[in-house]
Amino acid sequence: MDLENEKCVIVIDETLPLGIIANTAAILGITLGRQMPQVVGADVADQSGNVHLGIIEFPVPVLRGTAESIKQIREKLYQPDYSGLTVVDFSDLAQGCKTYEEFIDKMSGVPESELQYFGVAIYGEKKKVNKLTGSLPLLR
């Protein structure tokens, strides 16, 4: 990753219960990691010789959003200007499914306009990511 020209952020609806926020962050991170395995560093050993699996090599700020702001960001991400970005979203529909097959089935019957996004992860050109998320504060 070129830290000068690329950026990765996660935006999560701050009004969600803490457990849903944590679940959303985990799911977005796992899915984003699948898309970008090259950003995970090598395993490292501590002084005692215990091995710790590699972690992502750069910061991923988790930003505070609202259902409305995340929806607006997600809608913009469908526009051609943002087609080069890697985007992962997590919605109320996905969170409510018990199996992936159920998710596939339900998603095919729901228009995008009816989805309520819990969070979105975005990776790519820093200027584009900042244009979408630069005014959002950290989720604390």
Image (spheres, helix red, strand yellow):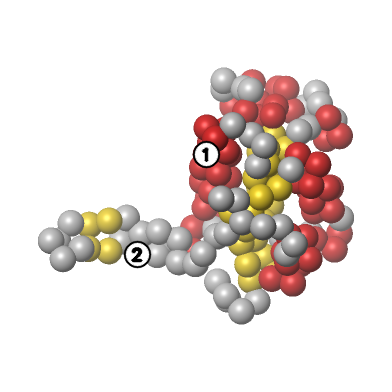
- Which image quarter holds the N terminus? bottom right
Residue 31 visible in the snapshot: no
> Circle 2 sits on which residue?
42
Determine whether, in the image, residue 19 is placed left or right of residue 128.
Answer: left
- Residue 45, image x, y percentages: 22, 63
Q: Which mark is residue 22?
A: 1
Q: Is residue 119 above or below residue 136?
A: above
Disc 1 crowd rating (10 Å Cα; few below 14, some 14-19, many 20+) is few
State the image coordinates of residue 78 (x, y, percent, origin top left). 83, 51
Residue at 18%, 56% (x, y): give it: 50
Query: Badge 2 local density, few (<14 within 10 Å), some, or many (20+)?
Result: few
Mark 2 vs mark 1, foreground winner is 1
Residue 6: x percent and y percent? 64, 71
Q: Nearer the viewer, residue 60 or 93?
A: 60
Q: Quadrant of residue 48?
A: bottom left
Q: Residue at x 56, y 50 (%)?
A: 140
Within the image, what quadrant is residue 12 found in? top right
Residue 124 sits in quarter: bottom right
Q: Is residue 110 left or right of residue 29?
A: right
Q: What residue is drawn where x is 49% and y is 67%?
A: 58
Residue 68 shows in the view: yes
Residue 114: image location, x then y, percent: 83, 30
Q: State the SS at label 1.
A: helix
Callout 2, which amino acid?
Ala
Instruction: Assign a secondary structure to mark 2.
Output: loop
Q: Determine whether 21 is above or below 94 in the image.
A: below
Describe residue 45's horizontal placement relative to residue 139 as left or right.
Answer: left
Q: Residue furthest front?
A: 140
**How much space separates mark 2 and mark 1, taking CA atoms?**
25 Å
* Marks 2 and 1 in Cβ contact (< 8 Å): no
